[in-house]
Amino acid sequence: MKPFLAAATVDELKTYCKEHGFPAFRATQIDSWLHTHCIIEPDKMKNLPNDLKTALKQDFHAPGSTVAEISSSADKVDKLLLKLHDGEHIEMVTIPTDKRLTFCLSTQVGCPVGCYFCASGRNGLTRNLTAGEMLEEFCIGTAHAGRPDNLVFMGIGEGLLNFEELAKCLNTLVDHFTFSPRRITVSTSGFVPGMKKFAALKREFNLAVSLHAPDDVTRAKLIPPKLRYPVAEVLAAADGIAKANNRQYTLEYTLIEGINDSAVHAEKLGKLAFAHHAKVNLIPYNETGGMFRRPRAKVIDDFEAAVGATGARITRRIERGSEETAACGQLRAVKKRNSGE
C-alpha cells in the first residue's frame, strides 16, 4: 500500500527527494505545508514545482481520504463522513464552543468490542486505520473547521486494539504537528493489554475509560464477554497509566435506564472514583434505536448528586450533535438515507 503523505517525517521526505532527484530544501517546504499548515494535498502547496506535485500524488496517498458528506446540527456540531482510499467509510466530529474547538476522531473502521448499547460496533470490525488515515482525519478537520484545541480519540473503534498505529499517530501529532499531549484524550472500553502498552509511552496523554458500571455483574449487561475485563483489572491498568504519566484519568459512565442508574450504582461508582483518584464523566444515554433508554431527568440529576456526595469529582457531558447522530455512541459511518446510496 502506498504511504500516506500526512504521516511522512521530514527525514523521510528528504530521502524521497534525494531518491527522486529533487533538491533537499523541497523536503523542508513539504514538511512546512504538512506540519505547520496541515495541508496534505500537493496541489495546494504553492511553492512546489509541478513535477514534484505530480510525483507526490503518484507515490503517496495525498490524501487517501475525502469528505463524502457533512451533517450539521443546530448547535454547530459537524459530523464528517470520510470515504477512505479503499471505499470504506468512517466518521469524525468537529465540536466548537465559545472557548475551544474539539475533534472527535476514529481509530478503526467499525468496532470489535460491540457494546450492546452503542451504534458504532453493530457491524463489528472491518479493519484498523493506519496512522496516516488518523492524521488525515486531523488535517481534514483542520481544513474544515480550523486547528483544534483538543483531540479526543472517542469516535468509531477501540484505539488500544490498534495500538501500534494509534501510538504512531499520537507521537506524530506531538513531535511533528506540535500538539500538546495534555490536549489529547484516548478512550478505551477497558482493553487491559492495550492499556499497559499505553502506560509504557510515558507521555502526558489523557485517558478516558468507558467503565459504564461499577461492578462486573452490571457491566456484563452492557459489554460482550470477548473483550470485557474485570472492573478491578481495568482500574488497576488505569492506575498504572496515571502513575506513568502523572495525569488523572476519567471514568466515562453512560447512564442507561434500569441498567446502571440506581442509587446503589451511584454510590459504588463514587467510592471507586474517589479511591482511585479518578473523575467521573456522566453521559446520559443517547438513544440509537435499540432496546436501551435514557433515564428521566430527575434520575440523572439524583445519580449525579449521589456520586458527588461520596466526595468524587463528577461532571456531566454536555449533549452536542445528537440530532445528527453525532453524539457519544451514535457514530456508525453510514450515509443519510436521502443521499441516494
Image (tube, grey):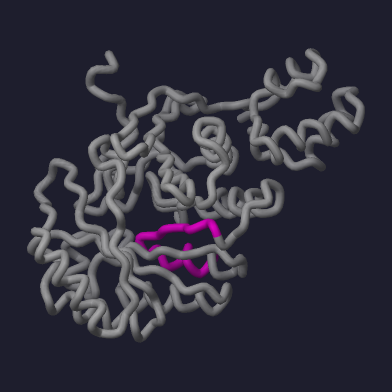
Please name the residue shown 32% across and 65% down the image.
281
| Lateral position of residue 241 relative to residue 69, left or right | right
- In the image, 181 versus 102, the foreground residue is 102
Q: Residue 220 at what x, y percent from top left?
A: 20, 65
Is there any visible trace of residue 77 in the rendered image? yes
Residue 164 in the image: above or below residue 20: below
Instruction: State which quadrant residue 34 falls in.
Output: top right
Q: Residue 27 at what x, y percent from top left?
A: 83, 33
Q: Residue 242 at what x, y percent from top left?
A: 50, 75
Please name the residue shown 48% across and 28% down the image.
84
Point out the stretch of residues depicted in magenta.
183-197
Please name the residue shown 78% across and 13% down the image.
50
Is there any visible trace of residue 57 in the rendered image? no
| Lateral position of residue 3 relative to residue 151, left or right | right
Please name the residue shown 14% across and 71% down the image.
302
Q: Quadrant of the C terminus?
A: top left
Instruction: State which quadrant residue 276 falls in.
Output: bottom left
Residue 60 in the image: above or below residue 156: above
